[in-house]
Image (cartoon, rainbow, N blue to C red):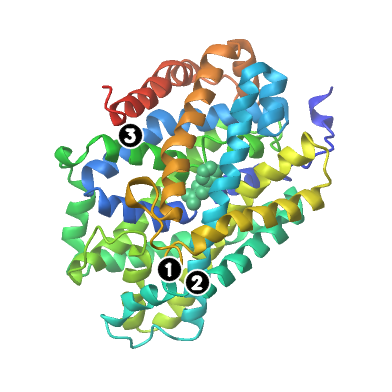
C-alpha cells in the first residue's frame, strides 16, 4: 500500500498538530489540576514530586512511545492491536485497557461534575466577596448533595458522548486545538500570583525540597500510578490515538512534547494552589477537595475575580472533556473495530452504561458515605486507587514487556522511523522500554506489597 494513500475506514487526524493537541488534551486534565496537587499534599510534597517526575521520564515517556507505535502500526483498538501483533494471552492486555477505560471514566465524570458545578457557581458570582472561611464550605455542601452531583455528572457525560459522536477529526480534534493555550496562560497568571503571595516561598519549599523519609512504598506507588494516570498511559488511550496518526508523524517527538506539557501543567497547578494553602494556614493534606477549597479564595478577593473564576473553571471543564473523550474513545473503538457496532450506537450505549457505573461514585460522599472499601476509603476513592495504582501500572508493565521483548526490533524501529528518520535515540528508548521501565514498575509493585 502506498503510504501516502492510506485510506482507512477509520478516521485520521487531519494534521500532525491535531494529533499532538489531541494527545496533550487527553493527558492534561483533572489529573493535573485536581489530583496532582491533592496527592502531593497528602504525601508531603518535595520527594513525592521529584519521584513523580522521575517516573514520567523513566517510565512514562518510553511507554507513551510504545503505545503510539503499537497503535499506529496496527491501526486498531487495543484489543485488536494485541490480537493482530501476537494474539493469545496478550489480547488480555487490550481487554484490561478497555475495562480500565470504562472504570476510570465512570468516576472521572463525577469529579468533572464538581468542576461544572463550580463553573456554575462562578457564573452566578458566588465567590465574589465571600469570606475566606465560607469558601471551603461551598465544597462541603456540594458533597452533601447527591442530586447535584448526579445532575452534573450526567451533564458532563452527555457532553462527552456528544463530542465523541462527532468522530475523530471533527469532534475530538477541533475540540482540542482551541483551549489548551488559554489554560496554560491562566495557570501561569495564578502561579505567578501565588509565588508573590506571603505563602509563596513556603509553597516552593514544600513542592521542591525533598524529604526522602516521606517517600514510603505507598507514596512511590501513588506517584508512579499517577504518572500513568496523568499521561493517559497503561490502558491503550495513547495506543488508540496513535492508531489515527499518519505515518509521517514523529512519534518520539510527540510523546516528549506531550509529557513535558503535561508535567508543566501539573507543576503550575501546584504552584498556584500551595501558596494559598500556606498563606491561609490550611492543611496541605486536605484531600480531594483541595483545588476547590483553595483557588476560589483567590477568586473571591482578586479584582475581576468572578471573570477569572469563570474562565478557570470553564477551562478546567474543557481540559476534563478532552481527557474524558479519550477514555470513551478507547471503549468505543473496541466496540466498533472488534464487535462491528455502529459508532453511534457504541458511543451512546457505552456512555450510558459508564454513567450508571459512576452513580455509586457520585453518591459516595453522602448517601453512601458510610460504605467503606479499600483502607476505609469511599467508593470513588477506592476505584480510583484500584485503577490508578494497580490496573494502569500493570497494563503499562505488560505493554513495556510486550514492546521490549515480544515485538521485534525491526518492527518497532521501522514504525518509529517512518516519521522520525534516523532516530538516534532508538537504543536509549529500547533500553528504557526493555529494562528500565518494567524493572522499575516491578520494584515499586513489590516494595508496596512488602515483598521487597
Ligand atoms: N490523563 C487524564 C488526566 O490527567 C485522564 C485520562 C485520560 C486517562 N485518558 C486516560 C487516564 C487514560 C488513564 C488512562 O486527567
Q: Which residue is drawn at 33% across and 78% down?
A: 137
- Residue matched to label 2: 146
Q: Position of residue 219 (x, y in %)?
A: 28, 40
- Give the vertical position of 18 relative to 201 (above or below): above
Residue 179 in which image quadrant: bottom right
Viewer-closest of 137 and 360? 360
Q: What is the tally of numbered marks visible in this picture?
A: 3
Give the percent coordinates (x, y) of residue 437. 41, 24
**Residue 221 position within the rendered picture, expressed as x and y whole percent measured from the top left:** 34, 36
Q: How far apart are marks 1 and 3 (CA)?
A: 37 Å
**Res. 260 image quadrant:** top left
Q: How crowded is mark 1: few (under 14 residues within 10 Å), some or many (20 or more)?
A: some
Determine crowd level at label 2: few under 14, some 14-19, many 20+ residues with C-alpha closer than 10 A: some
Question: Do callouts 1 and 3 mark residues in contact (Cβ within 8 Å)?
Answer: no
Residue labelled with disc 3: 54
CB under 8 Å between callouts 2 and 1? yes
**Camera-nearest label, 1 or 3:** 1
Q: Which residue is drawn at 66% across and 17% down?
A: 88
The extreme front residue here reads 371
Q: Earlier in the sequence, mark 2 or mark 3?
A: 3
Apparent side of residue 6 relative to residue 180 in the rendered image (left or right): right
Residue 243 visible at all: yes
Give the labeled residue for mark 1. 366
Amino acid at each position: 500500500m502506498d503510504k501516502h494513500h492510506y485510506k482507512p475506514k477509520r478516521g485520521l487526524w487531519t494534521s500532525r498538530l491535531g494529533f499532538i493537541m489531541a494527545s496533550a488534551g487527553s493527558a492534561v486534565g483533572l489529573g493535573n489540576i485536581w489530583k496532582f496537587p491533592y496527592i502531593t499534599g497528602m504525601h508531603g510534597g518535595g520527594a513525592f514530586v521529584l519521584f513523580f517526575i522521575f517516573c514520567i521520564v523513566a517510565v512514562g515517556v518510553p511507554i507513551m512511545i510504545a503505545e503510539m507505535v503499537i497503535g499506529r502500526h496496527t491501526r486498531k483498538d487495543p484489543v485488536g492491536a494485541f490480537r493482530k501483533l501476537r494474539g493469545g494471552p496478550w489480547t488480555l492486555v487490550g481487554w484490561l485497557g478497555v475495562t480500565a477505560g470504562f472504570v476510570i471514566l465512570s468516576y472521572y465524570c463525577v469529579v468533572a461534575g464538581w468542576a461544572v458545578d463550580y463553573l456554575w457557581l462562578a457564573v452566578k458570582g458566588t465567590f465574589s466577596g465571600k469570606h475566606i472561611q465560607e469558601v471551603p464550605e461551598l465544597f462541603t455542601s456540594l458533597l452533601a448533595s447527591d442530586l447535584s452531583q448526579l445532575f452534573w455528572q450526567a451533564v458532563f457525560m452527555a457532553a462527552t458522548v456528544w463530542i465523541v459522536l462527532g468522530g475523530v477529526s471533527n469532534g475530538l480534534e477541533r475540540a482540542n486545538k482551541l483551549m489548551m493555550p488559554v489554560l496554560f496562560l491562566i495557570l501561569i497568571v495564578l502561579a505567578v500570583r501565588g509565588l508573590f503571595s506571603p505563602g509563596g516561598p513556603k509553597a516552593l519549599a514544600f513542592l521542591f525540597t525533598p524529604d526522602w523519609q516521606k517517600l514510603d512504598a505507598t507514596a512511590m506507588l501513588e506517584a508512579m500510578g499517577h504518572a500513568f494516570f496523568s499521561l493517559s498511559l497503561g490502558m491503550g488511550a495513547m495506543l488508540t490515538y496513535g492508531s489515527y496518526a499518519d505515518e509521517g508523524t514523529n512519534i518520539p517527538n510527540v510523546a516528549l512534547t506531550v509529557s513535558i506539557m503535561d508535567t508543566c501543567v501539573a507543576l503550575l497547578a501546584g504552584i498556584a494552589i500551595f501558596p494559598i494553602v500556606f498563606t491561609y494556614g490550611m492543611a496541605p493534606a486536605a484531600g480531594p477537595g483541595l483545588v476547590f477549597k483553595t483557588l476560589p479564595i483567590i477568586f473571591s478577593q482578586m479584582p475581576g475575580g468572578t471573570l477569572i473564576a469563570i474562565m478557570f473553571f470553564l477551562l478546567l471543564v474543557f481540559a476534563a472533556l478532552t481527557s474524558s473523550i479519550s477514555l470513551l474513545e478507547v471503549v468505543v473503538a473496541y466496540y466498533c473495530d472488534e464487535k462491528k457496532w455502529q459508532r453511534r450506537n457504541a458511543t451512546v450505549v457505552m456512555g450510558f452504561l459508564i454513567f450508571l457505573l459512576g452513580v455509586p461514585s457520585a453518591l459516595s460522599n453522602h448517601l453512601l458515605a458510610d460504605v467503606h472499601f479499600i483502607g476505609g476509603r469511599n467508593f470513588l476513592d477506592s476505584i480510583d486507587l484500584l485503577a490508578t495504582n494497580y490496573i494502569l501500572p500493570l497494563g503499562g508493565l505488560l505493554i513495556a514487556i510486550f514492546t521490549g521483548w515480544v515485538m521485534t526490533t525491526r518492527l518497532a524501529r521501522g514504525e518509529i522511523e517512518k516519521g522520525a528518520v534516523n532516530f538516534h535515540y532508538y537504543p536509549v528508548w529500547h533500553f528504557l522500554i526493555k529494562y528500565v521501565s518494567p524493572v522499575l514498575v516491578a520494584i515499586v509493585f513489590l516494595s508496596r506489597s512488602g515483598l521487597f
